Image: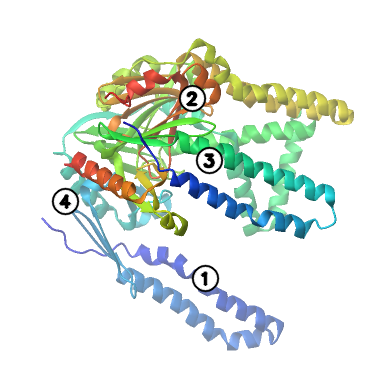
Amino acid sequence: MEKKIGRRALLLWRVRLCLCALPCPFLVALFFPGAKIWSAALTVLWVSVFLGLFLLYYPIKYQRLGYRVHGGSLAVHCGVFYNRLKAIDLGNVQHVSSVAGPLQRLLGLASVYVAGAGGVIVLPCLEAANARALCERLLEGERGERR
Amino acid sequence: MSDTRHRPHPYMVIHNLRRFLALLVIPLVRGFATALGGGFAAWLAGAWADILVLSLILGLSTLQWVFCFYSCDKKGLYFARGVLFRKRMFIPMEKISTLSVVRPFYLRWLHVVRLRADTLAGPSDQEDFSLFVGQGEAERILGVRKKELEEGRLTRQYRPRSLYVAALAAFSSSSFAGVFFLSTLISQTGQLLGNEFSDRLYGTFEHITQLLAFGLPPAAAALGYLLLFGWLIAFTINFIRHKNFCLRRRADCVQVSGGIFTNRDYSVSVDQINYLDIRQSVLSFLLRFCSVHISAVGYAKRKEDVSSVVPAVRTRDVGKTLGMFFPEFVAQPRQVWHNPGALFKFIGDPSWGCVLIPGATLLLRWIFPDWGSFIGWVGFMLCFPAYWFLIVRLIDYFSAGIARDGEHYTLHYSEGYYLHTVVIPRSRIAYVCLRQSPIQSLDKKCDLLIYSYSEKKHRHHIRNLDRQAAIELFDLSPEN
């Protein structure tokens, strides 16, 4: 059964986007004070990028992102433009780390990085308890495979 | 059995000097300052400071050597170095992927060799452990590893004919690598012997090009000869590197050696081999030859290393040769492959070059009619790689796919100008990714990206497979 990430992940991405978008109007006003056409064009550009990400990209990303630990492997389903299914055998997991920034901690989220000997699979913004449980499960699986 | 501590060969003192060369700035700055102010007498009066700095460099380098120790027994390699900051390192023998011995020609008279050990960890562009030791000591360490891996029993040995080594050198040589080597050589020589010397070399090249232009524009002929020279140089370097090639298979270990001026010996543990790669270029495909390479941490890591395990073998004999030396890696014919309609997925990328380069050539000839013959020649030369790439992708279209045999996968695909048949155990796959573009999702196809065990990301890309078949091949179905 595929697990979905919590709804707070979508909230986090949108909050982060808003924080990133905040300086845009100031920068446009600062660098193009008199040029109406330029400032209008740039405003249209950043607003459309903002709306595209806010209303389309992040909801689709949230909708598509899921994972499952099953049959000795971790499978992650993700992708917005491209649909991706990534899978790693638990025996091939080298190490697992869980990372939470200030915003993520505030919302009780954490990202999990699963490192294999040739690449990393990232599971962004899991609920902190789920991230901990997943880390333990992966490490248990890896130890089990080693034994 | 435990080994006593040894010190590396005293040549390490000279090798360590490079760490302290920055200190030479002091006499250099002093020299400039006195040249501007007091002249030779003033410089001579302060020469003691320069001698002091040189002694300091030599002293520090010697101290580094004095405090450097290593030991090697069946448990592993122990290494300690550093005067103020002591570094101790232990590499268990079973974790060593590749142990290699390099005998540079300039050190042969000293009987000094460079011993290198590599594991899955550590930096991806250099070895984890490297020391200069005496020839006898290196053989002893190699012997310890051999004993650990097997009972010393030689099972198979393969020495290819010089023709096959030349074939590998020919297929794997690139004009650009040769041109790069040539230009670096000339500019370095110019720095050493003066710019006049390098100018004379360039002048001679220009003169010869004009003589051998045979009606071509001189600039175009120069470009063509430069590429030809480049290829010849790359070929010579590759040939020298692989001459005297020898592959030995013992119980759990593969030993590869080769080289004329610099001899190289590699000992690779079979269970550390990530995958086996049967490689073909268009030319070798047409001549029905292939070369076999392995991916193991530390093997063929540096660009000057021996890169293959079988330099060239007839396609029909490859199964037999691999059966003798690598029975663990058996290539299977493809079981799952793309649909016939995937042709554009294969020829899409090269088609751009094939259409745009002739188009741009015609356009430029029309804009600059005075340069017509030169632009035509350059355009013609640039078309070659584009059409070559198209041919590679067309062959790939008829051969790409994937097969599974128990816990081993065989991947048939192309990357750049080479066709690959990779045999990889499931345990050496770091992870797999099934990537589906919006167009592919309409007919339920996907690209399969396999990331193999490696110190840095290495990807095998198989195009447009049936998604469900790929899922079943890797047991990724939720029902499993």
Q: Which amino acid, mark 3? A: Tyr
x and y, in percent, of residue A73 in the image: 29, 34
Q: Are discs 1 and 4 located on one and the same chain?
A: yes
From this view, report whether residue B21 is shown above or below residue B107: below
Find disc 3 in the rendering and name its residue. Answer: A58
Furthest residue toward right: B370
Per the image, label 3 sits on a secondary structure element best described as helix
Find disc 1 in the rendering and name its residue. Answer: B22
From this view, report whether residue A123 is shown above or below residue B339: below
Find disc 4 in the rendering and name its residue. Answer: B74
**Sooner in the amino-acid sequence: mark 1 or mark 2:** 1
- Marks 1/4 in contact by CB < 8 Å: the verdict is no
Per the image, label 1 sits on a secondary structure element best described as helix
> Chain under label 3?
A
Disc 4 residue crowd, few under 14, some 14–19, many 20+, Cα 10 Å: some
Q: CA distance from mark 1 to mark 3?
A: 52 Å
Q: Are discs 1 and 3 located on one and the same chain?
A: no
Q: How many numbered badges does the structure rendering display?
A: 4
Find disc 2 in the rendering and name its residue. Answer: B414
x and y, in percent, of residue B264 in the image: 36, 44
In the picture, which quadrant includes the N terminus of chain B? bottom left
